[in-house]
Image (cartoon, rainbow, N blue to C red):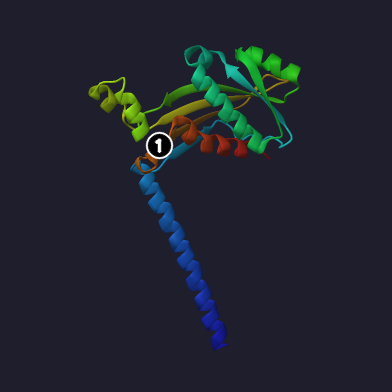
Amino acid sequence: MIKQSISFAALAFALVSCSSMNSAWQESRQLFEASQLLTTTAIRRETRWVIPAHASFYIARSQHISSVNPAHANALTELLETAVSNSFSGVRIGLFPESPDYALRSAQRAGSNYVVYPRLLAWDDRLGTWTEILTSLRQDSNEEIVAKVGLDHALVQLIILDTMSGKQVDIARIESGSGWLSLYDDEPATILLPGLLEYFDSLRV
């Protein structure tokens, strides 16, 4: 009986210790994120709709993004393809920039169940590595370089449309920012991808 009591006490102590360590880790991470030391991601959804894993998606190329910055449009399309493919079986990519209405028609012709229509609200690629700074030294003044040094930031709005009805299934805002401790490897694409992966994983049944 005494041995059993000791065993239960040891088990309880171990569980409390693990719980305390986990809480301490979570609190430390939240502190680091609040201090902008680690990369942060925030996802806001308008609905809690879920979609079967066998559903197929059509990733549209936004007219606005393509006209303002084709390079950012291509980078975002690649990120979306990676994120959607990670959670769903069927993915098609639009060949040309389209409006939401034209994207729906293209998705219907392609036989896709849902449309992903992106809006790029922020894509701030700051100077954060020595390579970027040295490259900037060749073409910018010291004042311009200092103004460009900082944390990267990306904000994307995703509109998910049902192909057949044309109705909005969900609207999500995914925002990511780099931290001072992760600055060396960061750029808008790398900090945004984890949030996109998490969002499409939350869409899957």
Which residue is found at the position 40% from the left and 52% from the top? 27
x, y percent for residue 40: 43, 39
Quadrant in which residue 45 is drawn: top right
x, y percent for residue 78: 58, 27
Q: Secondary structure at mark 1?
A: loop
Which residue is found at the position 53% from the left and 20% from the top? 73
x, y percent for residue 23: 44, 57
The answer to whether 99 appears left or right of 109 in the picture is left
The foreground one among 68 and 139 is: 139
Residue situated furthest bottom in the rendering: 2
Quadrant in which residue 135 is drawn: top left
Q: Is residue 158 visible?
A: no
- The image quadrant where one finds the C terminus is top right
Residue situated furthest front in the rendering: 138
Q: Is residue 88 visible?
A: yes
The foreground one among 109 and 71 is: 71
x, y percent for residue 3: 55, 86
Q: Amino acid at mark 1?
A: Ser
> What residue does disc 1 label?
178
The foreground one among 165 and 74 is: 74
Q: Please determine whether, in this image, residue 182 is positioned above or below residue 13.
A: above
- The image quadrant where one finds the N terminus is bottom right
